[in-house]
Amino acid sequence: MKSPTHRLAIALSIALLVACQPQANGVSTAAKSNEASPAAPTTAAQTLASEQGPIRVTEVVRGLDHPWALAFLPDGNMLVTERSGQLRRISRDGKVSAPLAGVPKVFAEGQGGLLDVALSPDFASSQRIYLSYSEPGDNGTAGTAVALATLGEAGLTDVKVIYRQEPKLEGPNHFGSRLAFDGQGHIFISQGERNKRPTAQELDKLQGKLVRLNLDGSVPRDNPFVGQADVRPEIWSYGHRNMQGMAIDPRTGKLWENEHGPRGGDEINLPQPGKNYGWPIVTHGINYSGLAIPEAEGREKPGMESPYHVWEKSPGLSGMAFYTGRPGAPWNDSLFLGALAERNLIRLTLQGDKIVGEERLLNEIGERVRDVRVGPDDSVYVLTDEKDGKLFRIEPPKTP
């Protein structure tokens, strides 16, 4: 006869074995950020309606910690940032890696953390990537920064900070930030004004500025303010509030960016060199309290650019992606934007640069859409900014 101690040991072993089995629906719950498998793939899919016909939406991964950005690798796998400071590799079938080593330390308070990720234009030969993030400074300060690093199987090496927003300021909000390449050897870095409104108009500071650099972080000689006294030469345009979406139109090479207004006044701009986009002097919004912006003088002013497109009620704009080069496809010549406040995905219909239609998708899911990218399979991929963050794949409507 087995002793009570032996029977107890068997029972505990069985319980441990059961606990380690996958859940019945094939989806694991989120794990701690330093564990090897923070999330699990799922085949959960649903068919939703759109103006152009049914779309199939598949939940690829869940359990991510406030994922912020997505970049596709040449093999179809993905890099995903989590705002709390992890960079992960996600396979095409939804397997999630442990956090990659070598990621710079981030200021992970409020809206800060690990932000955008982008492959270098020469990634095929160099294996280099760019990361934007909020970098901690002295005495609780922080600022947007960009690092260049070499991507390996388990982590990053040769990490070099090529840009730092100066001066670093106190506060947990409005870091931006997205990265975009113009195909001419330059990188654009979008930022916020760190919720310090006047800095957006102060040209000796980098808050509230769109920055343009060479790929190695040096300043291009043809930047609009190079050589001017008391003006930062990195600046491309200024008067921006908090730019959280940016993309190059593949059809024209034009740079588009979106930014949060305060309460009302989210906008799209096509930023031009040396131009002033008005914040906080020109705005369609008001303070969250309901009071006017103290510095605001109206919706327009000579010498300041009006928004290219504006929402009087703020969707809470975030990631941005063009869907082009697919003649005959129902979504060809579309611009997708994430919506945080309204918890959906915005699709704008384009005729050239003109916005001629707007559609809201994923209302049924009701989660904050932080990033949107077009995959090599012609599907649209979306990250939700939640504690239990998800990656969705959206298969577009079928061509009639």
Image (cartoon, rainbow, N blue to C red):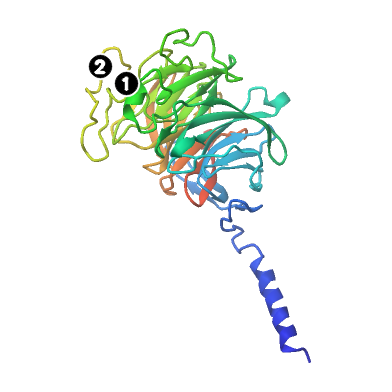
Is residue 351 toward the left or the right of residue 60 in the image?
left
Which of the pair 65/58 is nearer the observer? 65
According to the image, label 2 marks what residue?
301
Q: Callout 2: few (<14), some (14-19), or many (20+) C-alpha neighbours within 10 Å? A: few
Whole-percent x, y for residue 203 in the image: 39, 17
Q: Which residue is painted at 50% across and 18% down in the image?
A: 212
In the picture as drawn, the residue positioned furthest to the right comes out as 1
Lower sequence index among marks 2 and 1:
1
Whole-percent x, y for residue 95 in the image: 66, 48
Quadrant where the N terminus lies?
bottom right
Which of the pair 221/61 is nearer the observer? 221
What SS does tag 1 mark?
A: loop
Q: Which residue is painted at 35% across and 17% down in the image?
A: 276
Distance from the alpha carbon under mark 2 to that under mark 1: 8 Å
In the picture as drawn, the residue positioned furthest to the front comes out as 139
According to the image, label 1 marks what residue?
278
Q: Which residue is painted at 68% across and 76% down in the image?
A: 12
Q: Is residue 323 visible?
A: no
Whole-percent x, y for residue 51 in the image: 42, 37
Discs 2, 1 touching: Cβ within 8 Å: yes
What SS does tag 2 mark?
A: loop
Is residue 291 toward the left or the right of residue 19 in the image?
left
Dividing the picture into quarters, in which one does residue 74 lie? Answer: top right
Q: Which residue type does callout 1 highlight?
A: Gly
